[in-house]
Image (cartoon, rainbow, N blue to C red):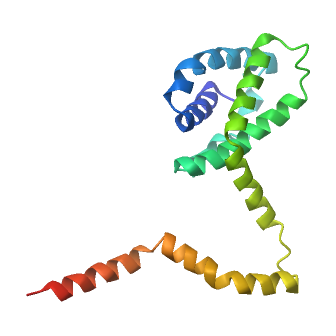
Amino acid sequence: MTPQIYLFILLSISSCFGCFFCQSILPKIEEDIEKLKADFNSSQSDVADGGSIFTERLKSWTETTEKKIILSQIISMYLKMFKNIDLATSELHVKNIHNALYTLNNSLTESFKKVNDLMELARLPMNDSKIQRKAVNELFPTLQKLLLDHPTTHVKRKRSQSQKRKCRC
């Protein structure tokens, strides 16, 4: 990964956690990541093959709450990577990065639960008749919640046009 990718991820994370995080940890973590990149030989040309792993996915997540959901998953992937590293014998920069990731992961637990909800939904056996019956029973409340929480612009436009027609004096 390129330094720009790491910086993008760190800035995305810091935007979710405020300026204090940015001022206190970000410069040190950036130094530690540079050392980690040297450990992993990440400047080799094959690293760029196939494009980025995480930053492309981050581009379509625009809202802060949305970003927290995807970032919680990305942070957990980094923590999985660190499970293969023996932290007891690791250098200080590796331990610092792991600790920062672990702290961030703990602050994203609610977002991680949302990711788990999405994964559980994806695993639902929609060809099961009992699941289908339950889904049909929940269809109206689900649509009602969607439409009340997120009215479409078409409905808004109709409403505003009808109000303009009524007001003509």
Q: Is residue 143 above or below residue 39?
A: below
Whether residue 96 sits left or right of residue 69 in the image: it is: right
At 12% from the left and 86% from the top, the residue drawn is 168
User: Which residue corresponds to the image point at 77% horizontal and 31% vertical from the top-left?
Assistant: 46
Report the side of 79 relative to 164 (left or right): right
Q: Residue at x 73, y 45 (%)?
A: 73
- The answer to whether residue 42 is above or below residue 14 is above
Specify the quadrant of the image occupied by residue 123: bottom right
The answer to whether residue 103 is above or below residue 164 is above
Residue 42: quarter of image: top right
Q: Could you tell me if residue 135 is visible in this image?
A: yes
Measured as percent of width and height from the top left, residue 137 is found at 72, 86
Q: Nearer the viewer, residue 117 or 73?
A: 117
Question: Could you say where residue 95 lies in the image, as x and y percent from the top left?
Answer: 79, 18
Horizontally, residue 57 falls left or right of residue 20, namely right
User: For this rendering, which residue is in front, 30 or 150?
Assistant: 150
Name which residue lies at 63% across and 41% down.
55
- Tell me: residue 134, above or below residue 120: below
Q: Name the foreground residue: 89 vs 137.
A: 137
Q: Does residue 30 appear left or right of residue 124 in this picture? A: left
Viewer can see residue 53: no
Percent across and percent down for residue 4 are: 59, 28
Q: Position of residue 99 (x, y in %)?
A: 75, 24
The mark tally for this picture is 0
Quarter occupied by the N terminus = top right
Figure quadrant of the C terminus: bottom left
Residue farthest toward the left in the current orientation of the protein: 169
